[in-house]
Amino acid sequence: MTQLEFLNIVTPFKDKVFRLAKRLLVSREEAEDATQEVLIKLWKNKTKIKDYKNVEAFSMTMTKNFCYDKLKSKQAQNLKIVHSNYQDHSVSLQKEVELNDSIDWVGKIMETLPEQQKMVVQLRDIEQYDFKEIAEMLDMNETAIRVALSRARKTIREKLTNTHNYGVK
């Protein structure tokens, strides 16, 4: 496989790999390193890439596993999961402050979710994968993914509503 063929396969989803790594590792630098490591592993196994049914799903699974390993290591004791990559520049300052506050709260609420629910929300709602692809990545059946997603969304919705209705909790 030539470098150009490899790039044609990997380029469409490398940003998703980075976003997943950033979701898990928080630090932009750590996420860039993780993305680079995954791409290097793919390059080293480029002769086998055509054997995989879904290279993108395989890459996302590699990214997830690499990040989990990194989080388990001693050098990553202080890392935590957050999400803040949504920005809308076409709104008033008041709306922007409210949106940022809501995004911050969603990030805080997501930190309280079980790990499986965090991953399902990230892959479905942020990365826009379909249930079959998520099932392959997380080695779960589609029904379990739908249940986890439903529970996660319900928890986020309830806690966000409580926060907006009753103030800081």
Image: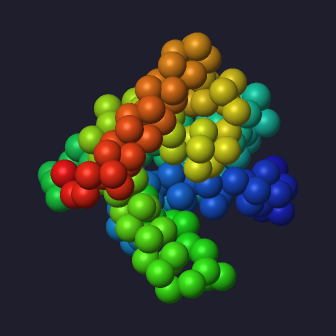
Q: How is the image coloured?
A: rainbow
Q: Position of residue 108 (x, y in %)?
A: 30, 53
**What residue is shown at x 62% (from left), y 48% (from top)?**
127
Q: Nearer the viewer, residue 46 or 60?
A: 60
Question: Nearest the camera: 44 or 150?
Answer: 150
Quadrant in the rendering for residue 10: bottom right
Q: Against 150, is 110 above or below?
A: below
Task: Compare residues 139 and 6 and report the one nearer the observer.
Answer: 139
Q: Residue at x 32, y 37 (%)?
A: 113
Residue 30 location, x and y as percent? Answer: 37, 65
x and y percentages locating residue 33 in the rendered image: 44, 64
Residue depicted at x 19% and y 51%: 169
| Residue extending furthest toward the bottom | 93
* Side (left or right) of 29 relative to 112: right
Residue 96 seen in the figure? yes
Q: Position of residue 53 (x, y in %)?
A: 76, 28
Image height check: is 80 above or below 99? Answer: above
| 96 left or right, relative to 43 | left
Instruction: Identify the residue at horizontal 36%, vertical 63% (top origin).
Output: 104
Q: Is residue 44 visible?
A: no
- Residue 23 left/right relative to 127: left
